[in-house]
């Protein structure tokens, strides 16, 4: 079997050799949300292509680099972009950055994504805390022999999204005067957007949001007991809700519009999460 533990360790060492910072929090920035990493101080920017074994992002709006820097006084490891199943990667490759985070000593991750809104209470540009997910990607990073150095064979997913981190995010959003929803995220393989019938099905089974990422990363993170906070930006309403076609340009435009609110929320929650991650 492929020794992902050793491969992730090699990648982690390569990253840590490039910086004096030792972050305990990792951040993954989804489509249109990468600007947060550009504002980090004392930053070391490392292309994914320079990290051994690291998958390279090909999606539009994903810069494909890891930025180690400070948000205020807090060191963070921020991924500008991720990889997806639809790019041709396996579930193990999609989740490999989480393995690297674990080997770097990361104890908490904040995952972000662009999502389609299914819940009619959401509007374009809404920020939504993910409280649970439905994995419809027909894939898991845990398929195959288990490596006990990462975690147990059958990890519990009852609290996949840390309840205390969600409470922190709600409190900080209220202080900032930001509306912050909460919902269930359904992950599909993509890259085609869903049909109206598929969106109706997802609503029936309890999904509030739909996207093509995040869930495999969460499974790998929780396998390693890394705590997770996940925030979606509703960049478009899902198929059949509005009488208009869906496009990736709309996703990028909405991400640009909400970037200030999104970054303000990230900066507000980081100090409180860092205390827990020490």
Image (cartoon, rainbow, N blue to C red):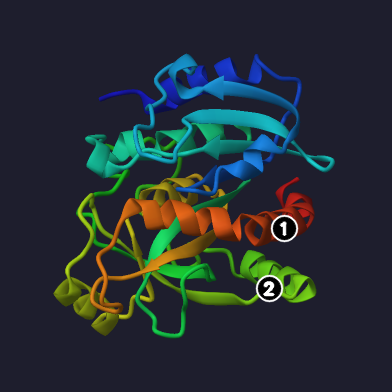
The reply, left or right, for residue 163 in relation to residue 135 is right
In the picture, which quadrant includes the C terminus?
A: top right
Give the residue at the far right of this rendering.
73
Give the residue at the far front of this rendering.
244
Q: Secondary structure at mark 2?
A: loop
Q: Is residue 101 above or below residue 210?
A: above
Residue drawn at point x = 25 percent, y = 71 percent: 239
Please tell me which residue lies in front, 85 or 134: 85
Count numbered badges in the picture: 2
Residue drawn at point x = 37 percent, y = 27 percent: 55
Q: Earlier in the sequence, mark 2 or mark 1?
A: 2
- How dense is the environment of label 2, judged by Cα within 10 Å: few (below 14), some, or many (20 and up)? some
Query: Quarter-wise, where is residue 200 in the image?
Result: bottom left
Query: Quarter-wise, where is residue 204 in the image?
Result: bottom left
Residue drawn at point x = 28 percent, y = 80 percent: 203
Q: Indicate the position of residue 225 as horizontal and vertical percent values.
A: 54, 49
Q: Which mark is residue 264?
A: 1
Q: Is residue 122 above or below residue 168?
A: below
Residue 187 in view of the camera: yes
The reply, left or right, for residue 8 in relation to residue 60 is right
The reply, left or right, for residue 30 in relation to residue 119 is right
Compute the Cα span from label 2 to label 1.
10 Å
Query: Quarter-wise, where is residue 90 in the image?
Result: top left
Q: Which mark is residue 178?
A: 2
Q: Indicate the position of residue 214 as horizontal and vertical percent values.
A: 41, 52
Circles 2 and 1, Cβ within 8 Å, touching? The answer is yes
Q: Indicate the position of residue 117 as horizontal and vertical percent values.
A: 38, 72
């Amino acid at each position: 079997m492929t020794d992902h533990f050793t491969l992730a360790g090699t990648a982690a060492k390569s990253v840590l050799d490039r910086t004096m910072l030792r972050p305990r929090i990792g951040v993954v920035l989804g489509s249109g949300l990468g600007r947060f990493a550009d504002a980090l101080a004392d930053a070391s920017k490392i292309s994914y292509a320079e990290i051994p074994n690291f998958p390279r992002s090909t999606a539009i709006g994903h810069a494909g680099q890891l930025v180690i820097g400070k948000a205020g006084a807090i060191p963070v490891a921020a991924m500008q972009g991720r990889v997806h199943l639809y790019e041709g990667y396996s579930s193990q490759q999609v989740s490999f950055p989480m393995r690297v985070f674990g080997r770097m000593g990361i104890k908490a991750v904040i995952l972000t994504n662009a999502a389609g809104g299914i819940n009619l209470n959401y509007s374009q540009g809404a920020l939504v805390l993910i409280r649970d997910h439905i994995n419809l990607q027909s894939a898991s990073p845990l398929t195959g022999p288990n490596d006990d150095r990462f975690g147990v064979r059958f990890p519990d997913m009852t609290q996949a999204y840390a309840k205390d981190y969600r409470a922190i995010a709600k409190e900080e959003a209220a202080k900032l005067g930001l509306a912050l929803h909460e919902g269930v995220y359904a992950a599909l393989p993509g890259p085609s957007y869903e049909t109206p019938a598929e969106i109706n099905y997802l609503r029936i089974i309890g999904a509030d949001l739909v996207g093509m990422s995040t869930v495999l990363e969460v499974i790998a993170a929780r396998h390693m007991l890394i705590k997770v906070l996940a925030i979606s930006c509703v960049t478009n309403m899902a198929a059949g809700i509005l009488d208009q076609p869906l496009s990736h340009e709309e996703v990028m435009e909405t991400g640009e519009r909400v970037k200030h609110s999104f970054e303000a929320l990230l900066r507000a929650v980081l100090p409180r999460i860092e205390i827990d991650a020490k």
